[in-house]
Amino acid sequence: MNGLPSIIDCFTLNPTIRYRPGSYMASAIGSLDILRRANTYRPKWYIIPDEEHATIAAYQTLEYQLRVTPRSYVWALIVNQFGLVAPFAQANSDDVWVQITDTCNGIPFFGDFARGRGFQTRQGTLTDQRNQMLPHLFTQPRLILEPGLLAVELANTAAIAIRPQVIIFTAEPCEVYKQ
């Protein structure tokens, strides 16, 4: 033991990252290196839907308009699904499908709706807290231009109502005030 403190990656809050060539996480973090070191950006999270117990009826799609600071970068995403009976118990996000579109250029983030399970952070067991709230990094951050609007669509493919949650991680520019 050398007495030095453990180094934790503060950008992803993941102490278990091993920087190996060919590793997705290492490559994704490497592509975000300039954004991580920029002192003119600060982190901001957006949670959709903003109502705590919002549900999506069976086979329905909800559309949200999210106002983001222009020149922000979207760098990660989390999709969760919670039970209706046990409101804070996570369920598999198999029934949530997500599409995000930048309204400035009309280009969607994904080629089609993306299944929520690909961005889920559900722990393996009730006592396993190691991977709780670790975001899924994009390989390249997405720049959001003027007017700073994102169209977020959440679709339910289940025969029952569901309670989804999407967390969008951004780095927004800091405003410099001069006197």
Image: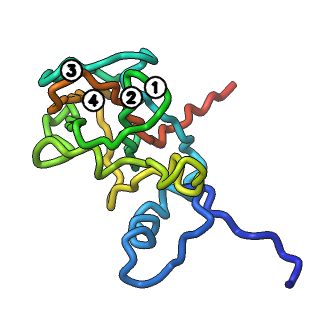
Q: Disc 1 to disc 3, how far (Cα)? A: 22 Å
User: Which label sits in the foreground, 1 or 4?
Assistant: 1
Q: Which residue in the protein does label 3 denote?
A: 62
User: Which label sits in the foreground, 1 or 3?
Assistant: 1
Check contact, mark 4 vs mark 3: CB within 8 A.
no
Residue at image point 36% right, 81% down: 22
- At which x and y percent is residue 31? 40, 65
Instruction: Give the numbered dot on residue 56.
Output: none
Mark found first going from the N terminus, 1 or 4: 1
Q: Which residue in the protein does label 2 denote?
A: 83
Q: Residue furthest right?
A: 3
**Between 90 and 24, the one nearer to me in the picture:** 90
Mark found first going from the N terminus, 3 or 2: 3
Q: Please name the amino acid that badge 3 sits on.
A: Leu
User: Which label sits in the foreground, 4 or 3?
Assistant: 3
Q: Disc 1 to disc 4, how far (Cα)? A: 31 Å
Q: Which residue in the protein does label 4 denote?
A: 150
